[in-house]
Amino acid sequence: MLLRGEWTAPEGQGLLSSDARVKTLRKVLVTYPDVRHILPDRVSLEDTTEATVVETLKHFLERQQWLVKSVVIE
């Protein structure tokens, strides 16, 4: 995931920021099935995650334009 400049790690801490909006976003992300862990610039999913869940998560993150420039699936 490519983050907007002010959110990039280590200064902005990305998805691990203490900003209230990012904390709320993390709470939502961990409700998705198969989320293993969250790092400053990525969300790790189980290897067995269905493609529909990956696509849903991708679209959700793309809507967070205040934080995310683009989403890359590896």
Image: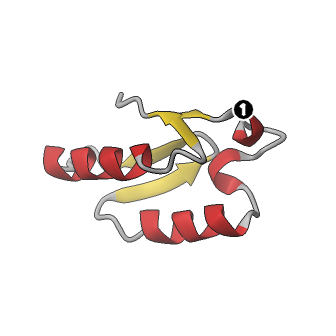
In this image, 45 relative to 48: left or right?
right
Residue 38 left/right relative to 73: right
Q: Residue at image x 36%, y 28%?
A: 74
Q: Looking at the image, which residue is at 65% across and 35% down?
A: 4
Q: Quadrant of residue 17?
A: bottom right
Q: Is residue 6 above or below residue 46?
A: above
Residue 42 placement (x, y as % from top left): 52, 41
Q: Would you place residue 58 above or below residue 3 in this image? A: below
Viewer-closest of 65 and 43: 65
* Image vertical order of residue 27 relative to residue 65, above or below: below
- Residue marked by disc 1: 5
Q: Nearer the viewer, residue 13 or 3?
A: 3
Q: How many marks?
A: 1
Coordinates of residue 5 in the picture (x, y in percent) = 72, 32
Task: Name the residue located 38 percent from the left edge and 71 percent from the top edge.
Answer: 31
Residue found at the far right of this picture: 11
| Element under disc 1 | helix
Residue 16 found in image quarter: bottom right
Q: Position of residue 8 (x, y in %)?
A: 71, 36
The residue nearer to you, when weighing 42 against 61, is: 61
Residue in the image at 33% along x and 64% along y: 32
Query: Relative to 74, is 12 on the left or the right?
Result: right
Q: Amino acid at mark 1?
A: Gly
Q: Assess disc 1: are there few (<14), some (14-19) or many (≥20) residues with their C-alpha within 10 Å of its C-alpha.
A: few
Q: Coloring scheme of the render?
A: secondary structure
Residue 35, position as x, y percentages in the image: 38, 58
**Above/below status of 18 relative to 59:** below
